[in-house]
Image (cartoon, helix red, strand yellow):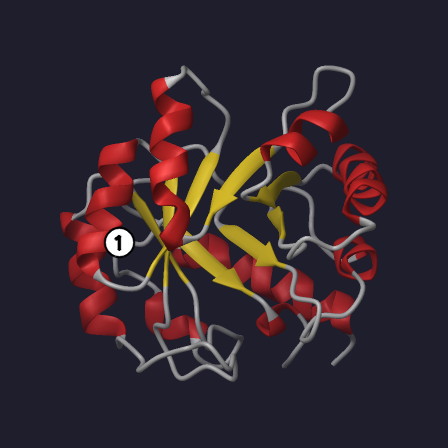
């Protein structure tokens, strides 16, 4: 299946999954990864309008140039852009009033709390790998929690799959929306419909059948 067709179908799937606490984030969050998705700009070309892209740059020396190009693409194609835990990058690439959101890995949630305490009202997402971390992120005031892994994942850092019952329970008890990540694709995603999730997040799922 062509990548653009997969992206279109993933966006439609995310709309069907979306329920519960919707918040400000779109139902589909696509995350870059240098090893699994290749060039962020190529991935961004396939992101559908009304979705979001999280640029995880891992300190790449060209992140400012890539970030500016992603911001331009986001404005032109109509998707939301967030960058991973880099306030300088987010500030530098915003232009013409466009605000770039911030994604916070679980280990840096304390930095998100500090920014919220300073009055930073940009869109924040946060990763969580257990309910305690999700509840902590909700207290910080993030806009959605990206909870993983829900299904078995090919990511080398993924742990044991949580399963649909666990993520459904969390979605119904957490004060903010939950986006499911980890092994979410066109085959597994339909299992998430009707569980009270705010949406889905994917890495390679945006490219694979």
SS for callout 1: loop
Q: Is residue 51 left or right of residue 140?
A: right
Q: Which residue is mark 1?
A: 196
Q: Position of residue 175 (x, y in %)?
A: 20, 39
Q: Is residue 44 left or right of residue 175?
A: right
Q: Position of residue 24 (x, y in %)?
A: 45, 32
Q: Quadrant of the C terminus?
A: bottom right
**Above-or-below relation of 16 to 53:** below
Q: Is residue 3 shown to the viewer in this render? A: yes
- In this view, the residue in front, 186 or 58, is 58
Q: Position of residue 115 (x, y in %)?
A: 42, 26
Q: Is residue 143 shown to the viewer in this render? A: no
**Above-or-below relation of 87 to 84:** above
Q: Is residue 80 left or right of residue 14?
A: right
**Above-or-below relation of 36 to 117:** below
The residue positioned 40% from the left and 36% from the top of the image is: 111
The residue positioned 53% from the left and 76% from the top of the image is: 186
The residue positioned 34% from the left and 20% from the top of the image is: 117
The residue positioned 24% from the left and 53% from the top of the image is: 133
Say which quarter of the image contains residue 69: top right
How many residues crowd mark 1 within 10 Å: few (<14), some (14–19), many (20+)?
many
Say which quarter of the image contains residue 188: bottom left
- In this view, the residue in front, 8 or 95, is 95
Q: Position of residue 143 (x, y in %)?
A: 38, 36
């Amino acid at each position: 299946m062509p990548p653009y067709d997969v992206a279109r179908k993933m966006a439609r799937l995310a709309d069907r999954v979306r329920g519960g606490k919707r918040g400000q984030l779109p139902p589909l969050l696509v995350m870059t990864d240098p090893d699994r998705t290749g060039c962020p700009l190529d991935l961004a070309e396939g992101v559908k309008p009304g979705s979001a892209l999280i640029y995880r740059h891992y300190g790449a020396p060209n992140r400012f140039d890539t970030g500016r190009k992603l911001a331009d693409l986001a404005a032109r194609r109509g998707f939301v852009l967030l960058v991973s835990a880099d306030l300088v990058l987010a500030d530098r690439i915003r232009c013409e009033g466009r605000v770039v959101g911030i994604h916070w890995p679980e280990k840096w949630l304390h930095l998100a709390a500090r920014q919220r305490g300073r009055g930073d009202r940009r869109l924040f997402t946060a990763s969580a790998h257990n309910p305690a971390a999700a509840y902590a992120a909700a207290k910080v005031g993030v806009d959605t929690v990206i909870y993983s892994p829900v299904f078995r994942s090919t990511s080398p850092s993924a742990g044991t799959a949580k399963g649909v019952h666990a993520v459904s329970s969390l979605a119904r008890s957490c004060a903010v929306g939950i986006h499911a990540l980890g092994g979410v694709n066109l085959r597994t995603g339909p299992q998430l419909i009707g569980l009270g999730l705010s949406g889905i997040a994917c890495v390679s799922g945006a490219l694979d059948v």
